[in-house]
Image (cartoon, rainbow, N blue to C red):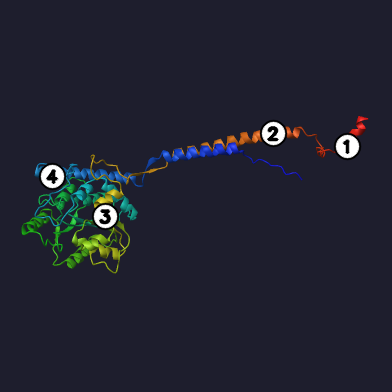
Amino acid sequence: MAMMWRPGKASRPVLALVALLSVIGYMLVEGLPQKTRKAHYKEKVQAAKLMARGMEVIKRARISIFGRIDAEHDPQATGMIGTGLTPITSNTGILAAKQAAANPNFAAVLVQIYKRAKLKEGDVVAMAFSGSFPSLNLAALVAAETLKLKPLIISSISGSNWGANDPELTWLDMERLLFENGVIHNRTVAASLGGEQDRGVGLPPEGVRMLREAVKRNGVELIDPPDLTSSFDLRMNIYREEAAGQPIAAYVNVGGGVGSVGSSIVKKMFAPGLNRELPSAERIRDSVITRFSRDGVPVIHLVFVEKLAKTYGLSRGGPPLRVGTGDVYAAMGYNMTLVWGVFLGLLVCIFVLLRMDLKHYGTKLTGFLGRRRPGSSPPPPSPAGAPPSMSKLDSSN
């Protein structure tokens, strides 16, 4: 029986052309991405605009009190950068971190973190603010209010270098101005002096006096514990009383205030950003942040600011800061209009090319069948050298 090769439904040229078109389509899709907005874009922009408004309030206050903005240390003219050293400076601070934090888009970062923590409208959020990072205090608060959370704030008001460490413009003063200007609607419910033992140990007497005056003029309850453990107990009791029976859905810690983290060791054990579990339960020391985490409360730890800024693609200097810039708002992704256009274009091309190819083979098949007589089969080929058949000899006679 003779073996005959039968071509497939599509010829090799057609397959090669389809492959070429597919490669071109792939290169177009990969080479022409577009920015796509991330989830909760509207809330992020709203929070960032609110933070920018708050920063403007603080900037005006700083100019009113001190007559100018320190252009050398606050090149963006945010108004959120304090002084190198004052009587209420509690610790060493990093200027670059304070500059990175003074970015209104950090409020958008907090919106994203709150959503990752699955916080929803009406949830109670305990917050520990520090005079070291007034910008992050503002970001955490406006983001919470944008999402209609219920913040409960305890602040330690001394601060590290370049923070809210000006005795005439402490964090409590900033917070009051923000409240009076309608930027925020929640304020600190109790405040400690901060510093060692959370009661101003290590500060000069003048600094302690200035801090006490700041607490008094802003009408805030003073936490004045005999020791650090007592500070933890007082803070936990205040949070529970202010929550009025509602569960605390998250704990936000800003900076490294000892009244919240207890020690630098604990501060470093929690990762910057969202922490869902207690790290190294056997080794970690007592603190407010530890107690909340041990109780299963998500912890949002706002430290190592430059790392956080890099993670979310925020500007850390250079051109003027603009609301809506950074990876927290959008990411590069596929242009879905182009993806669908390439996909549908390939389908049409494949359909057309296959029809043309099948028509070609159909025409060849029709011509082949037309050369055959109906009802008969072609005579078998004669072997080489064989004499002609008798029927042909007879017909020749």
Question: To which residue does mark 1 refer?
Answer: 389
Residue 251 image position (x, y, % from top left): 27, 59
Residue underneath mark 3:
150
Q: Looking at the image, do the residues carrying marks 1 and 4 touch, with CB atoms under 8 Å apart?
A: no
How far apart are labels 4 and 3 at the CA level? 29 Å
Q: Inspect this view and state whether residue 23 appears.
A: yes
Q: Quadrant of residue 368?
A: top right
Which residue does the image show at 35% across and 44% down from the upper left?
Answer: 330
Discs 4/3, front? 4
1 or 4: mark nearer the eye: 1
Amino acid beneath label 2: Lys
Which label's residue is closer to the chain start, 4 or 3?
4
Q: Position of residue 61 (x, y in %)?
A: 13, 44
The residue tagged with tag 2: helix, strand or loop? helix
Taking the image as shown, residue 176 lies to the left or right of residue 104, namely left
Secondary structure of the residue carrying numbered label 3:
strand
Name the residue furthest right: 397
Q: Which mark is residue 62?
A: 4
Residue under pointer 2: 364
